[in-house]
Amino acid sequence: MTDAKKSATLTIGDQSYALPIFSPTAGPDVIDIRKLYGEAGVFTYDPGFTSTASCDSTITFIDGGKGELLHRGYPIDQLASKSHYLEICYLLLYGELPTAAALEDFELTITRHTMLHEQMVNFFRGFRRDAHPMAIMVGVVGAMSAFYHDSTDIADPQQREIASHRLIAKMPTIAAWAYKYSIGQPFVYPRNDLDYAANFLHMCFAVPAEEYHVDPILSRAMDRIFILHADHEQNASTSTVRLASSSGANPFACIAAGIACLWGPAHGGANQACLEMLKEIGTVDRIPEFIARAKDKDDPFRLMGFGHRVYKNFDPRATVMKQSADEVLDLLGIENNPLLQVAKELERIALEDEYFAEKKLFPNVDFYSGIILEAMGFTTSMFTPIFALSRTVGWISQWKEMIADPQNKIGRPRQLYLGETARDYVDIENR
């Protein structure tokens, strides 16, 4: 962090306190309140931490007003159109785009780590047959620390590197096996001759009884989904990973904590909720009814897949995702699918209706990703596991950055206490 160039003055009663102000390379200035409690005896109050920077980072930057998402300075639309997921992984992990030789070495390393310890097969089979894939992922990823003892020492840079590669490589296998287990099909092992996205699709949809060939258009669409969800700055699950890692927990436990947080419908479950909403609407002729409900402030109904907590403009990821949706649906010949017709009509209204424009309720990345994943054949219960698979590299990059930060200390938020003050215990016979 650079030295503060200016300061703010906070006045409490007849006392004034100078608070340093730091200016980032992009984004709003940040007031440093680290010494506020020690000097003034007060805390700040910020539920949801929506106005609080918990760390400094060089990985991802979002400008919600402009609809801008940068990874290490590179715009997401350029990365999604010109790059592929493993190259993005390298960029997030190491800060720069790789040379051809470095990328080849990195891809080889990831490919050679995709297998799971064979004893983990028994761990999968310990779950109920109808277990949600996210429940399986939380358990299996957390249990990796019991299988890979040589990469749990966070003080060892080499072990951190090995753990990072293992998590990126093995997460598609874990997610695919969670899916196979949930639908009662045998596990399909990874193949070294397939790229990252194609290998995942093969493990999800191949069966021992016949040959399965991954269509390159579907593989590319899957790769884009991975790219567009790779990292998103200090969101709830990333903050969870950072908070868990601040205690010195091993990397597998930290990523499992991130997966658990992502499971929430307000975070990673948004694309599933969007698809379920489209199914509830059912047909195009019912759209006006739901639009009216969305505009009614007294109706709790909300259109899922529109607007975003951070983006106050068009979600830059949605443009790329829409292109993938059109390609996939055209390939599969289901452009006349009723669900798609509802989605396209909703999209048209959102882009033309003054109400949506005024409130900046544009289609977001979740609006299109759910449509793509269902068209590919995934059950809705797999939408969030695929999100977790994609976000793993972001979590790891943030984890590595935090571990290496000399300012790192265990997270300990404060509170505004509104409970009872001190009182004496009352014996039970006198209550």
Image (cartoon, rainbow, N blue to C red):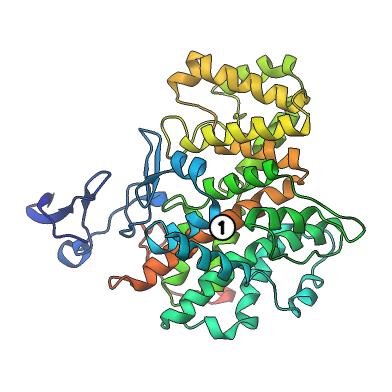
- Single out the residue that lies furthest toward the front: 101
**Which quarter of the figure is the N terminus placed in?**
bottom left
Query: How many numbered marks does the figure carry?
Result: 1
Q: Nearer the viewer, residue 349 or 335?
A: 335
Residue 343's spot in the image, x, y percent? 66, 25
Residue 65's spot in the image, x, y percent? 35, 33
Query: What residue did someone put label 1 on?
Result: 261
- Single out the residue that lies furthest toward the bottom: 150
Q: Quadrant of residue 329?
A: top right
**Which quarter of the figure is the C terminus placed in?**
bottom right
Q: Nearer the viewer, residue 132 or 171?
A: 171
Q: Which residue: 26% across, 45% down?
A: 26
* Residue 411 shows in this picture: no
Residue 130's spot in the image, x, y percent? 83, 58
Q: Nearer the viewer, residue 130 or 327?
A: 327
Element under disc 1: helix
* Residue 374 shows in this picture: yes
Q: Residues within 10 Å of mark 1 (few under 14, many from 20)?
A: many
- Which residue type does callout 1 highlight? Cys
Q: Which residue: 46% across, 35% down?
A: 316
- Single out the residue that lies furthest toward the right: 209
Q: Which residue: 76% across, 55% down?
A: 202
